[in-house]
Image (cartoon, helix red, strand yellow):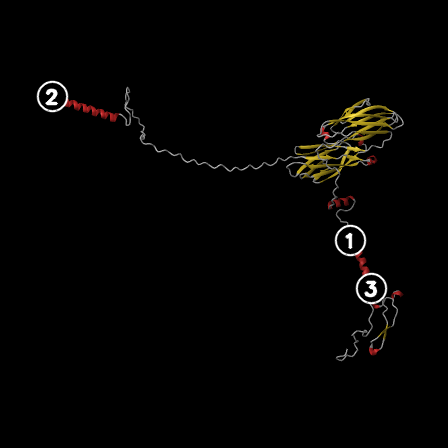
Amino acid sequence: MEAPSGRRTTRRLRAGSFVLLATACSVLFAVPAFAEPPGDGETSTAPVETPTTEVPTPDPTTEAPPTQAPPTTVAPPPPTTEAPPSPPTPVHRFKMTVSTVSLGDAYWQGDGSGELVVAIKNTGENVGKDTVTGYYALPSGAQVTGGYGSGGCNVAVGAYSFSCALPPDAMGQIVLKVNVDPGAWKTITAGQITASIGAYQRIAPISFAFTTPPTPGIELNTSAPPLPAASAPADESFQLAVRLRNTGVTKAVGAVEIVTPPGVDLVTFPTACRSHKRIAGDRDRCELGDIAAGKEVSGNFGMAISAAARAELPLVGAVHAYLAPPGLDMVETRYDYKITAPPVAGSEAPLPTSAPPSPPAQRNLDSDLSLRNQSGGDGSQMSSMPIIGAIVALVALFGVFVVLSLRRRMRLDTGEDDSLRADEIEDVMLVPVSGGLGGKSEVITRSSVPRSLTLPRLPDGPVAGSRFRASNDPPKRGGED
């Protein structure tokens, strides 16, 4: 009975070993490598195969070598170079001064010529040679008859324009010859000059000044006090005093007209004005009523000047006065007044407006021919025949004198001149000559040729004291002198 139990035990052991072996095989082939066994309460499931290629997982026990970061190459900072300074900004600017066209006493005798001088100076900053261009306009009754420039300025009289090419701080001048009509002193107003460089522009008035006309029966005087000094130009006011006197023998109706320069306005009238009205933008009339013979009327007119006009001082205005005696022609006179002020503190002195000398007139062949044509001559023929004729005559006269002089000398040398004066002929003198042949003295006569034409003639034979001998003297022996 023991043999069968031993066999069953052996079979159980074999079956247990087979189970253990199967379990071990299932663990080896069913669980993935390096997979941890599932914990308590977890069910392990077989992994699902995927067609992707498995990437070998590195051994966790093997430490990966530390990867060194590539060296970072830091570029050196660029050299710090200072930016070049920007060029200075050019400032175009210039200064302009305009003179007054002054008409003296010759104007009342019919001579209405005068000069207008314009001085321009380049006062720009950071600029080189700059060109100022401009034009001028004269009032009715005045005309420009000519002109010239200096210091780089040129004038185009027909085009009423001018231009000045000026280096820095250089000054040029323009001179315009102006003629004023005989009756223009009654109505003439101010002109204007405009000059510019790009956007910079200057405008200045052209004033006309007359002496008091020699009008009998009326007398006029005006005066404007100088404006006070100021640090900068500003709007101001002043008083213009006017005094009108009737120097005639009868009473007359009087009136005055105030003419103001550009930038100046008449704002108040004196009580002597019975009525007033504006005739033009720069002209106001004041009616004074009757003025008895030998009497005068005076008053102060209030004037206002703008800052721009004050910067252009001095300015010239005019007052016209009228007297109308009953039954007689009206008489009129004029008196100019000047508005002045001390220069603004820190401002430059005005440019000189004295006229520079005019350039010499240049003559050329065309101008000479045109003048010759105007005088009625033939411009194609040069008028040199009189000069050539004069030269030929002088040469001929000189030749005649030379020929006559030679003929006279020849006649004197040959003794054929019988026209000699008695005082020109030497007297015959006996001159003893010692040392002749045989020790005898010889007597010779001098030539009758005038002293002034010939030299003294030597006598024949050896000269006393000399070693010259006559040709007929026998030769001396050796050792004899």
Q: Are marks 2 and 3 in contact (CB under 8 Å)?
A: no
Q: Are marks 3 and 1 in contact (CB under 8 Å)?
A: no
Q: Tell me if mark 1 has few (under 14), some (14-19) or many (20+) residues whose alpha carbon lies within 10 angstroms of its own.
A: few
Circle 1: element type? helix
Question: Which quadrant holds the N terminus?
Answer: top left
Circle 2: element type? helix
Number of numbered tags placed on the structure image: 3
Who's the residue at 11% across and 21% down the image?
4
Residue, disc 1: 388
Depicted 84 relative to depicted 247: above or below: below
Residue, disc 2: 4
Q: Quadrant of residue 265?
A: top right
Which of the two discs, 1 and 2, labels the residue nearer the N terminus?
2
Question: Which quadrant holds the C terminus?
Answer: bottom right
**Disc 3 residue type?**
Arg
Residue 149 image position (x, y, % from top left): 72, 39
Residue, disc 3: 407
Which of the two discs, 3 and 1, labels the residue nearer the N terminus?
1
Depicted 476 relative to depicted 377: above or below: below
Which of the two discs, 2 and 3, labels the residue nearer the N terminus?
2
Indicate left or right for 359 with 459 as reference: left
Q: Quadrant of residue 260?
A: top right
- The image's mark for residue 33 is none
Residue 360 image position (x, y, % from top left): 75, 44
> What whole-number distance in Å separates the C-alpha atoms at marks 3 and 1?
29 Å
> What whole-number distance in Å separates the C-alpha atoms at marks 2 and 3?
207 Å
Which label sits in the foreground, 2 or 3? 2
